[in-house]
Image (cartoon, rainbow, N blue to C red):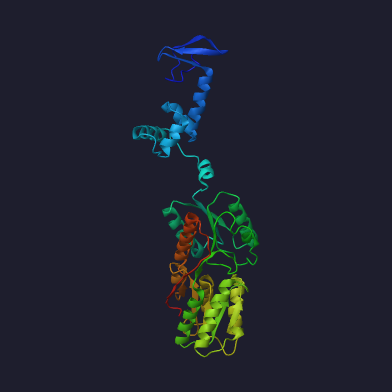
């Protein structure tokens, strides 16, 4: 009988056959004075497997405690009708068995998963990772998990990311669009249907959902003001792709500053690029051939501004002596500090944008009020050697 073990004491030395019960072999353990059948052993094996895999159910807890499943459920949910001693005993047993609540079942009952989805263009630079850090910080403090999808600056990937999140159980979604996103039907079909959606940083104004923006127009105006106050009069501006909302708002700030100082914008000083290195360098070389020449370059990307400084130095052009350089970016980005000369930037306050986006989304999830709001996050100039 050594191949059969008692499912109470787990010993096999003193197991005896004890007849048949409902066509099942019955056994008797002399060590613990206990009768059982092979079906009892199978149930015990299943229960033990669940414990090992972390899939212990409320039914398992009920069997161990000698109560019904309803009592276990009430104890774990702190039901007021159950006495404190019973609650404490069942909760302690659940802890010992490593019971983990079934999140899917709870979400079906509560209609909440405490999970938010984020679609973001890129995580390789600190610009967007800083925003994500802000989102994660606020979400974690509020008890929410974050599911991240990276669109890799590709519109089709953004569309599939949105669909994937919507097909899963999330309570709300944050989205920062790609450089190339011009159609927004992938969002329109979901607006107002199941969960709140909020745009942050890169936004489109004609969608009836909340938006968290950087104050780009004011930032570009303040940068241009500074360069003009330094005596610059031929300020070239490196912009993103045509139709890109951030290019439009920063260009508006640039023009506003020029007008304020009595200067007319020169179309030859404005160049749209997709931020790839060859096109950035080509734009700079074209500006250097102009007559009269340029005395400053304002890039709406700090990464491109660093590339511009290095290219000018290779050509023997003094920065900031002959040409001043300014960028838009993240105040904590180290690359602007290590380049020679160090890069002056307008700090977009990316982490604050992420934090505010998460706060607004969680508030809409909790209150159920999805009325569109718009919030603007201000930045600041950080002056370094290049300007």
Query: Count of labels shown?
Result: 0
Instruction: Work out which quarter of the rendered image holds the C terminus and state it.
Output: bottom left
Q: Position of residue 206 (x, y in %)?
A: 60, 69
Q: Position of residue 31 (x, y in %)?
A: 40, 14
Q: Nearer the viewer, residue 45 or 372?
A: 372
Asked whether, in this view, residue 133 is left or right of residue 169, the answer is left
- Residue 314 in view in this figure: no
- Residue 327 in view in this figure: yes
Q: Quadrant of residue 274?
A: bottom right
Q: Quadrant of residue 78?
A: top left
At x 56%, y 67%, the residue is: 203
Q: Outermost residue, front direction?
A: 81
Q: Nearer the viewer, residue 255 or 86?
A: 86
Q: Position of residue 44 (x, y in %)?
A: 49, 24
In the figure, 262 relative to 37: above or below? below
Q: Position of residue 113 (x, y in %)?
A: 51, 48
Q: Quadrant of residue 137?
A: bottom left
At x 65%, y 62%, the residue is: 185
In the figure, 211 relative to 33: above or below? below
């Amino acid at each position: 009988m050594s191949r059969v073990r008692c499912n109470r004491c787990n010993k096999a030395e003193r197991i005896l056959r004890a007849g048949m019960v409902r066509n099942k072999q019955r056994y008797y353990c002399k060590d613990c004075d206990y009768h059982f059948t092979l079906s009892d052993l199978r149930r015990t094996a299943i229960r033990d497997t669940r414990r090992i895999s972390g899939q212990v159910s409320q039914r398992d807890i009920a069997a161990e405690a000698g109560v019904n499943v309803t009592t276990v459920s009430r104890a774990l949910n702190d039901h007021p009708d159950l006495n404190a001693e019973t609650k404490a005993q069942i909760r302690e047993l659940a802890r010992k068995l490593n019971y983990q609540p079934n999140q899917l079942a709870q979400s079906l009952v509560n209609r909440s998963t405490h999970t938010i989805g984020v679609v973001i263009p890129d995580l390789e630079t600190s610009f967007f990772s800083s925003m994500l850090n802000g989102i994660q910080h606020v979400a974690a403090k509020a008890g929410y998990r974050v599911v991240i999808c990276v669109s890799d600056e590709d519109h089709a990937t953004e569309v599939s990311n949105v669909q994937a999140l919507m097909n899963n159980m999330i309570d709300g979604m944050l989205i920062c669009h790609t450089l190339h996103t011009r159609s927004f039907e992938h969002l329109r079909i979901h607006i107002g249907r199941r969960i709140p959606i909020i745009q942050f940083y890169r936004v489109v104004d004609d969608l009836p959902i909340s938006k968290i923006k950087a104050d780009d127009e004011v930032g570009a105006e303040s940068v241009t003001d500074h360069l003009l106050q330094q005596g610059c009069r031929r300020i070239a501006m490196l912009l993103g792709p045509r139709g890109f909302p951030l290019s439009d708002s920063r260009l508006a700030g640039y023009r506003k500053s020029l007008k304020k100082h009595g200067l007319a914008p020169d179309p030859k000083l404005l160049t749209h690029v997709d931020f790839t290195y060859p096109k950035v360098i080509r734009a700079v070389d074209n500006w250097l051939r102009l007559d009269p020449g340029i005395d400053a370059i304002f890039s709406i990307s700090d990464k491109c501004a660093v590339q511009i400084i290095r290219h000018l130095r290779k050509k023997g052009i003094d920065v900031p002596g002959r040409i001043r350089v300014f960028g838009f970016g993240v105040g904590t980005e180290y690359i602007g500090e290590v380049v020679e000369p160090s890069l002056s930037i307008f700090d977009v306050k990316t982490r604050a944008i992420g934090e505010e986006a998460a706060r607004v989304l969680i508030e809409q999830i909790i209150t159920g009020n999805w009325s569109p709001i718009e919030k603007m996050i201000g930045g600041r100039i950080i002056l370094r050697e290049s300007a």
